[in-house]
Image (cartoon, rainbow, N blue to C red):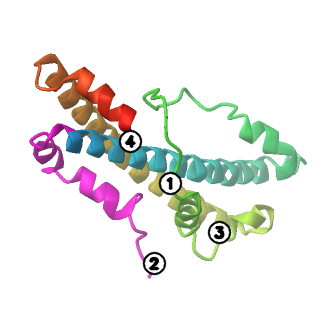
Amino acid sequence: MTREPIPAGGAAVDALLDPGFLEAAVQRPMADVRRLRRQAEQEEVNLSYTRRLLQGRLDIVRRELQRRAEDDGRSLVDLLPEILAEKGRGPAHGLGRHQTVQPAAPEEYESWVNALTPGVDLSAVPELADADLERAARALATAEGSLSERRRGVQRVMDGLAAELGRRYQDGEADVAALLAAEGRH
C-alpha cells in the first residue's frame, strides 16, 4: 500500500486555503493584512517552484516513454535540449505575476517531488522499466494537478488580500504616507 504524500505546501498552504482564512484576515489590522499577503506570496512562490521541478521530471519521463515507443535511435540525452526548450508545450497557465521573492527552502521542495515516486530513481530514467516509468508519470501527473489547484487557491487568497488592501486605501482607511514611512523604517 502506498502512502499519500503530504499535499504540496503542507500545513502553511492548508492554513491559507482554509475557507475561513480570508474572511478572518480582512477583519485584521492593516499591518496584519499586509503580512498575510506577503506570507501568501511566499507560499505561492514555493508552490510555483515545486511545480516547475515536478513538471521538468514529468516532461523527461513522458519523453522517455515516447522515445521508447517511437524507437528513433536517439538517446534521452540527445533529446534533453528539446525537452528543456518546452517544445510542443502550450501557453503558460500562470497569472503572469511578477515574483519579488525566492523559494524559501528549495531542498525541501525537491525532496517532496522525489518522494512522489518511491522506489523509482528518476536520475536513471533510461535504465528504468516501462512499468516504473508509467507509474512515475501517473504519480507526477496526479501530484501536478493537485499542486496546481492548491497554487490557484493561494493566488485567489493573494488577490483577496490585495483587494482588501486596495479597498482600505481607496476608502481612506489606510494612509499611503504612513505606509511609506513604515517601509522606510525597515
Q: Mark 4 or 3 closer to N-term?
A: 4
Q: Is residue 158 left or right of residue 69?
A: left
Which residue is identified by label 3? 132
| Residue placed most toward the observer, 183 or 67 | 183
Magenta span: 1-30
Q: Secondary structure at mark 4?
A: helix
Q: Nearer the viewer, mark 3 or mark 2?
A: 2
- Name the element at disc 3: helix
Contact? badges 4 and 3 (CB < 8 Å): no
Q: Secondary structure at mark 1?
A: loop
Crowding near the residue tagged with mark 2, few <14, some 14–19, many ≥20 C-alpha atoms within 10 Å:
few
Percent x, y of residue 29: 14, 41
Closer to the chain start, of discs 3 and 2, is 2
**From the viewer's perspective, is 51 left or right of 119?**
left
User: Which residue position holds label 1?
Assistant: 104
Give the labeled residue for mark 2: 2
